[in-house]
Amino acid sequence: MTDFDNFADLFKWNRSLMEDDWNDGQHLVIKDKRKLLEDHEISTTIKVAEAMGNKHNIGAEMKWKATMKEMGGNDLEAKIKNNG
């Protein structure tokens, strides 16, 4: 019997690829997402644009999401962004 792998949501992968704008001057995009404990999540995105002259433009974004059970289940989110 053949064993098929589940590729989950390919449409989500394609949408994420288009959001990173690979065709519009992006040379490199690095994404990292980590879960801390059971109710905290940190995601980091670093983008390097194609060189113009002798310089690259580097942008970074960091997000922190948490659900505070102690505060009645409120959701908190913080974001730091640098466009280079």
Image (cartoon, rainbow, N blue to C red):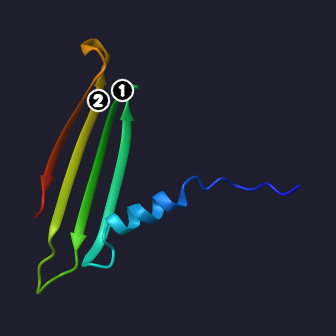
Q: Is residue 36 above or below residue 57?
A: above
> Residue 8: x, y in percent?
58, 52
- Find the distance from the CA under tag 1 to the CA under tag 2: 6 Å
Residue found 14% across the figure and 84% down from its top: 52
Q: Is residue 7 toward the left or the right of residue 68 in the image?
A: right
Q: Which secondary structure lies at badge 1?
A: loop
Mark linked to residue 31: none
For residue 10, which quarter of the picture?
bottom right
- Callout 2: 10 Å neighbours few (<14), some, many (20+)? some
Q: Position of residue 18 (x, y in %)?
A: 37, 68
Q: Residue visible at 31% across and 19% down? A: 73
Q: Amino acid at mark 2?
A: Ala
Task: Look at label 1 and name its amino acid.
Answer: Asp
Task: Give yes or no for contact between labels 1 and 2 (Cβ–Cβ under 8 Å).
Answer: yes
Q: Quadrant of the N terminus?
A: bottom right
Whether residue 67 is situated above or below residue 55 in the rendered picture: above
Name the residue located 22 percent from the left edge and 47 percent from the top edge.
62
- Corner quadrant of residue 5: bottom right
- In the image, residue 3 sits, relative to residue 22, either above or below, namely above
Report which residue position mark 2 lands on. Answer: 66
**What residue lies at 27% left-to-right and 55% top-to-bottom?**
45
Q: Which mark is residue 39?
A: 1
Residue nearest the viewer, comparing 22 with 58: 22
Does residue 19 appear to the left or right of 48 in the view shown? right
Indicate the position of residue 69 as horizontal and vertical percent values: 32, 16
